[in-house]
Image (cartoon, rainbow, N blue to C red):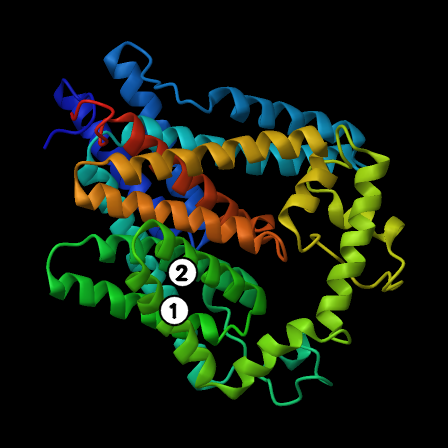
């Protein structure tokens, strides 16, 4: 199958190499931020070379160009409020540049469903390796008592929380839930029992790895995904998918203790979150329009810290996606981000309901529930403070837009 708009041998080879750089970005995304950045840069240069060879720009507009541009502009304006403008600017152009470049690179260079399928396969393969390394950490013992991820007084027996390649159990948990949601959609709409069984086993394996992170908030996202499948697919699916988290939690006493501790009023993690949310609301109240500055939360938080009062402790994010974004880039910036996110959720829902191909319907259902897991998880955490997780959001958004724009629903003529 020919790729994209390749008309000459040079354009064809450039398009071929660009696609494989995108596949490498997807594969290395949870494994190595450095490798991901290298392939993103290489793919971008190849895309530019392809346009030069074609003698014309190849840029497809999306329904979200305006809110994305607004988000970029408001994020830039927030730099003016940052306590260290140079640091905020450096952080902004290094990260926001990656996010937007990745989005438009995917939208403009994946024009067949086979390409989309290969990218999803690369991401699933990478997730399998991430989970495998998580199991390796667990069985070989990864003592996290010195890392302050668990209240040692409340959970004295909890010494191991896996984090695999993502350096933090909550980041790993957020990543796994999103991939589980995608895989579930693909599996439910796959043809053949064997393929369905493979996807079910894959989801179950990721679920076990998720349990070993002992991340409590992630299970709220899992519940949201299961409920969404029950509403959008079938009630039988709800009960089938519910068996995985119930079996994992019921069979693991420590996991049950962690979940029950969510409603414990003396839980140190819950108390800290409440204190951070109160401090973050004060930041928003002080600078509601343009925020405290892109990436400046950790610099500003000590001015609003009334709970820890420890200058040696650095708080990098608010443990709430919505409050954190509003604090850093202002309420208008948060609204622009929500417009982008809600818009892609709407596209995924429409594509899942109108796609003529079961594979497309399953993929878009998976995308939809992955976004929902991020939205629900954002109430108690903010995994996108990590660049790899932020890039995952923009990658999934780009895949959603690419599938929708290139005619894989009944609303558009198939290419």
Query: Whole-percent x and y of residue 374?
Result: 51, 51
Asked if 111 appears above or below 307 in the picture, the reply is above
Q: Residue furthest front?
A: 235
- Mark 2 Cα shell of 10 Å, populated few (<14), some (14-19), many (≥20): many
Looking at the picture, how far across and down is residue 9, in whole percent?
13, 22
Q: Toward the viewer: 410 or 293?
A: 410
Q: Which residue is mark 1?
A: 242
Q: Residue drawn 42% across and 46% down?
A: 36
Q: Is residue 226 above or below residue 254?
A: above
The residue identified by callout 2 is 226
Horizontal side of 34 relative to 203 (left or right) equals: right
> Which residue shows up at 36% across the image and 57% down it?
230
Report if residue 181 is visible in the image: yes
Question: Label 2, label 1: how many angstroms apart (C-alpha)?
Answer: 6 Å
Q: Earlier in the sequence, mark 2 or mark 1?
A: 2
Residue 346 shown left or right of residue 379 in the figure = left
Whether tag 2 and tag 1 are in contact, CB under 8 A, the answer is yes
Kindly state the secondary structure of the residue where label 2 is placed.
Answer: helix
């Amino acid at each position: 199958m020919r790729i994209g708009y390749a008309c000459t041998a040079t354009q064809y080879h450039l398009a071929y190499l660009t696609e494989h750089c995108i596949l490498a970005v997807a594969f290395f995304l949870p494994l190595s931020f450095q490798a991901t950045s290298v392939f993103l840069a290489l793919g971008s240069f190849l895309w530019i070379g392809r346009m030069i060879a074609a003698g014309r720009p190849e840029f497809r507009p999306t329904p979200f160009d305006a809110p994305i541009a607004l988000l970029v502009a408001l994020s830039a304006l927030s730099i003016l409020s940052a306590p260290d403008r140079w640091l905020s600017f450096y952080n902004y152009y290094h990260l926001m540049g990656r996010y937007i470049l990745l989005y438009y690179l995917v939208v403009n260079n994946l024009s067949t469903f086979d390409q989309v399928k290969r990218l999803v396969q690369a991401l699933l393969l990478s997730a399998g390796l991430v989970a495998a390394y998580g199991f390796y950490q667990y069985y070989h013992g990864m003592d996290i008592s010195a890392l302050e991820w668990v209240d040692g007084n409340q959970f004295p027996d909890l010494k191991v929380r896996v984090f695999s390649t993502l350096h933090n159990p909550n980041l790993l948990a957020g990543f796994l839930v999103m991939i589980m949601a995608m895989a579930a959609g693909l599996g439910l709409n796959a043809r053949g029992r064997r393929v369905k069984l493979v996807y079910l086993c894959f989801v179950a394996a990721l679920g076990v790895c998720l349990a070993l992170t002992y991340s409590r908030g992630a299970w709220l996202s899992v519940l949201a995904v299961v409920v969404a499948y029950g509403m959008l697919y079938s009630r039988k699916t709800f009960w089938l998918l519910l068996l995985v988290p119930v079996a994992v939690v019921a069979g693991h006493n420590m996991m049950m203790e962690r979940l029950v501790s969510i409603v414990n009023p003396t839980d140190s993690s819950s108390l800290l979150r409440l204190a951070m949310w109160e401090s973050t609301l004060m930041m928003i109240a002080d600078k509601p329009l343009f925020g405290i500055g892109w990436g400046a939360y950790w610099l500003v938080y000590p001015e609003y810290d009334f709970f820890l009062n420890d200058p040696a402790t650095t708080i990098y994010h608010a443990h709430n996606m919505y409050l954190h974004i509003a604090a850093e880039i202002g309420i208008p910036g948060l609204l622009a981000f929500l417009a982008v996110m809600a818009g892609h959720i709407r596209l995924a829902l429409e594509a899942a309901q109108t796609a003529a191909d079961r594979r497309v319907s399953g993929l878009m259902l998976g995308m939809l529930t992955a976004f929902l897991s991020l939205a629900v998880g954002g109430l108690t955490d903010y995994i996108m403070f990590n660049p790899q997780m932020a890039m995952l959001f923009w990658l999934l958004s780009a895949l959603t837009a690419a599938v929708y724009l290139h005619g894989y629903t009944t609303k558009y003529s198939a290419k």
